[in-house]
Amino acid sequence: MTSPITWVDAFSEVPFGGNPAAVCLPREPLDDQRMQSIAFELGIAETAFLAPSEDPTTFGLRWFSPAVEIDLCGHATLASAHVLRERGIVDGSAALTFHTRSGPLRASFAGDTIELDFPADPMIPGPVPASVAGQWPGAVVASGRTDFFTFVVLDSADAVRSYQPDLAAIASTGSRALLLTAAATPGSGADYVLRVFGPNVGIDEDPATGSAQCSAGPYWAAELGRDDLVAHQLSRRGATLYVRPGQDRVRIAGRATTVLTGELC
């Protein structure tokens, strides 16, 4: 039996920007091996699998990278909400709830913008892991860990932009990914910048990472003294994310663009 599948560029208003995600709406349940095989075949950062429930605004949601199942993924959640509205499964008038490995996550619509409501994951200060300690001589201003990331703050946006990743060293940190961030250059239209590298989850560099804002957002809200922030992800594809940290939640907003649709055999 075939299943509809949609390729979406999340956190982008135009095709070929932001972060690609595939969104699959299986007509019958798929086992874990099948979902992982589909994600590997597609070869993009994440493939999302949706399951309906008796409540028309509530869905099960799982995410797979080409290598592993992911505990939390922002861009594929945003893509999932986009596809549900675009296909007419929901009309966008009510917030959606997704039941995931990270608990219930919510998405709401305001025109073309989709806002996610995710749990905060603040950085716990600590030393830069030994395997990457020499990567940024003189440029590290703060560091630590979160549940998912090695978290490193550099002294300039240029230092983040110009970094040439040592993927073997990053993999040796033991974290699922490295989050590299800095204050944005004044006048750039952003408050902070970031890049994300995840060789341990099969993603050398993630183009746009919603879940990273669960950690970067609270950090920069405290540093900058405000809670309404714009983040630029300095990947090759580029992305803009609108971030509003709260006490224990972070709201992450952006747009999405459909690139292609089809049927999964």
Image (cartoon, helix red, strand yellow):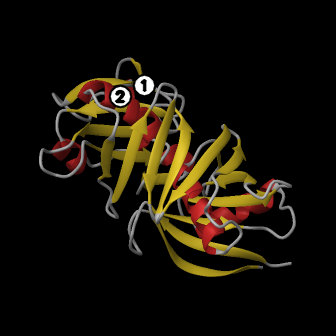
Residue at coordinates 16% horizontally, 52% vertically from top-left? 188
- State whether residue 127 is above or below residue 187: above
- Nearest to the eye among marks 1 and 2: give it: 2
What residue is shown with label 1? Answer: 123
Quadrant including the C terminus: bottom right
Q: Secondary structure at mark 2?
A: helix
Q: How many marks?
A: 2
Between 107 and 154, the one nearer to me in the picture: 107
**Residue 160 sits in which quadrant?**
top left
Quadrant including the N terminus: bottom right
> Label for residue 219?
2
Percent of width and height locating residue 6: 62, 73
Q: Is residue 161 left or right of residue 6?
A: left
User: Mark 1 near mark 2, Cβ–Cβ under 8 Å?
Assistant: yes
- State whether residue 42 is above or below residue 222: below
The residue positioned farthest toward the left in the image shown: 187
Q: Residues within 10 Å of mark 2 (few under 14, many from 20)?
A: some
Q: Secondary structure at mark 1?
A: loop
Can the viewer see residue 74 in this picture?
yes
| Real-space Cα separation, disc 1 to disc 2, in angstroms | 7 Å
